[in-house]
Image (tube, helix red, strand yellow):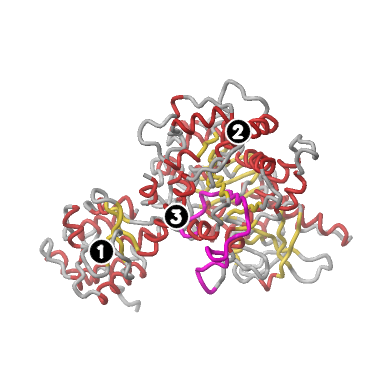
Amino acid sequence: MTPHKTSPMAQLDWISAQPTQGLSAAQTLAWLSAWADALWLRRLDAALSAQWLRLDPNASPALLVASAVLAQMEGRGHTCLPLSELLQPPVQWLGWPSEAVQGEQGLLALWQHMPTTLHDWQEALRSPLLRHAAQPDAGQPLVLGGTPEAPLLYLRRYAAYEQRVGQGLRARALARLPVPEQATRQWLDRLFGAPGPEVDWQRLACAVALRAPLAVITGGPGTGKTYTAARLLALQLALHPGPAPLRVALAAPTGKAAARLKQSIDKALVDLPIPPELLDLPALVDGMGPARTLHSLLGARPDTRRMRHHAAHPLDVDVLMVDEASMVHLEMMDALLAALPAHARLVLLGDKDQLASVEAGAVLGDLCRYAARGAYDSETVAYAQAVAGQTIPPAYFATAEPPPLAQVTVMLRESRRFDGPIGALALAVNQGDAAAARAAFAPAHTMLAALRPATPQAVCDLALQSDGGWADYAASVLAPPTDPRQHPEWVKGVLRSFDRLRILCAVREGEWGVSGLNAAVQKTLATHAGLPVQAGEWYAGRPVMVLRNDAQTGVFNGDVGVALPPADGQGLRVWFLDGETLRSVAVMRLPDVQTAFAMTVHKSQGSEFAHTMLVLPPGGAEVLSRELVYTGITRARERFTLVEAADGLLEAALSRPSVRASGLAQWWG
């Protein structure tokens, strides 16, 4: 006989009889523990509150609840908890199912026992475990920051990260570097042509990036971020006083993004029509070396959070350019700023509207909060005219106290590549216009398609049978050359064929997640394309994503390769393609990988595919967002397919713009 399983909430039957405001600390822990049993909280969240009660037996129930919610929010990418959000049950922040919110032992029930005013919350949080941000740090694990009107609760580590990053970026934004106006104007004319009547935002971005040791260049797909970055590097080389060579480093959060950055920058520099006697661009290309992941650049170590490069051992660079900056989380930005010499210029490139990092923080989003409206002060306006020959329209002037970070930020506003149906869809999604987004699929054209309601098998069939789909990929895997001299080109062909299409998921688990769709695709390829799939094992043609940085093998989290035999046909190696350069690692040296026919939208950032299929799962309201859909769309170069497991999922996602709680902007005035 199957034993009867007791609901994790059955132990809380006493709650319904508990008077409002009469909850004890022990009962609060029991409540939080039951939520963890129901998988609404993580075990870590409830354990943190239990640890606080051990350290402070007088801790209030409100402190225990706030700590568990704070820990849960940190796991969801937030860096702090605004206390004002606790005046009501934080339903929107937690994104829990209705049972967790409205059930007898749910969020609404617990909140009947919580403080009802901001003052009462602050009083309830009084504890030796908490300090106010202005007080000395004696190791208290909780910090209350923000302002008296808008207090923010932090875990100690994130309070320190935000303070250092906020102060560091502000200092860089306020610093001013000497700019030779006449020489700069001449070089801008060489690089962009004579200025016209309209603002050339790319030209302006290059000029603005010279004036401070921090520059932020943001824009959507096709607006020319790397085009602008290449010209900025050429401009900095031309103005570099010497005699030592200009030391430039390129980096990105993932290996794929780093490789694409290097390839794009190199091509753009080589194609510049500048005589070598004026500027030795090939030497600049050679001197930069390969672009690296941020983990590799900073010297990440497996046994500690501390990087090999830090304030006492800084990077040997004059210019550091970081692409896909939306993926840079708060802790990484803290490490990056610590390792950067004071004189070095930091240039951040990225699309502010993409998904933020998986880890806590949304640094680029915080940096770009004024990017769309400019908010330029009179000094920046005069500088743009004098140095770049650009007249900034009054619509982009600051209307209040000019924010310092806005003076080093330029948003590229004209898409030169992404202006067809895919671009129109991305714009509608970015604006939250569900009707326009849905209408974009109505005309008959090959660039946009929609499957709804769909089945996992329909996704697999389309991936196999579509033009440039994985049937072609499987055929190329099954046709290795007999001549070993042709092996490198065959491997490159297989890798490029695989990279033409990707399935992007909002979730990891379930039949609509990464794991389920990877399994379904492999079964379909084995049955209909003859790929020698062996579940859970290595086989020729298995694409994999690396899940952990490994400096010894030279692979990093997010790298994608394909398992193929070497030229002698003995065994299998995973092959990676960086631009035109092949590298491989024996499969036995890659224990931390997952099959990569499907990947999460987060993992796809920094990559592009000819055909992207974005899968919206049923019942996934808590993970769907406007930014997730936008990011998925903008991974597509030639064709985009939206897959909805049920009707209305696109509208649901677009109604949920992603918001991350952060206090970073408080340091910028």
**Hey, which residue is sitting farthest top in the picture?**
197
Q: Which one is in front in this view, the residue at disc 1 or the one at disc 3?
A: 3
- Callout 2 secondary element: helix
Q: Which one is in front in this view, the residue at disc 3 or the one at disc 2?
A: 2
Left or right position of 290 against 648: right
- Asked if one can make out residue 170 in the rendered structure from this viewpoint, the answer is yes
Specify which label sits upstream in the sequence, 1 or 2: 1
Q: Which amino acid does label 3 sit on?
A: Val
Residue underneath mark 2: 181
- Where does the image place residue 286, in percent across and percent down from the top left? 75, 52
Magenta segment boundaries in residue numbering: 303-332
**How busy is the neighbourhood of tag 2: few (under 14 within 10 Å), some, or many (20 plus)?**
few
**How busy is the neighbourhood of tag 1: few (under 14 within 10 Å), some, or many (20 plus)?**
many
Q: Which one is in front in this view, the residue at disc 1 or the one at disc 2?
A: 2
Tell me which residue sits at (65%, 64%) in the image. 555
Against 152, residue 223 (above or below) is: above
- Where does the image place residue 226, in percent across and percent down from the top left? 63, 42
- Callout 3 secondary element: helix
The reply to whether discs 1 and 2 touch (Cβ–Cβ < 8 Å) is: no
Residue underneath mark 3: 165
Label of residue 65 in the image: 1
- Callout 1 secondary element: helix
Q: What residue type is labelled 1?
A: Val
Against 559, residue 368 (above or below) is: above
Give how far apart the Cα atoms at labels 1 and 2 are: 57 Å
Label of residue 291 in the image: none
Give how far apart the Cα atoms at labels 1 and 3 are: 28 Å
Q: Which amino acid does label 2 sit on?
A: Glu
Asked whether 257 or 382 is in front, the reply is: 382
Against 481, residue 302 (above or below) is: below
Left or right position of 443 against 364: right
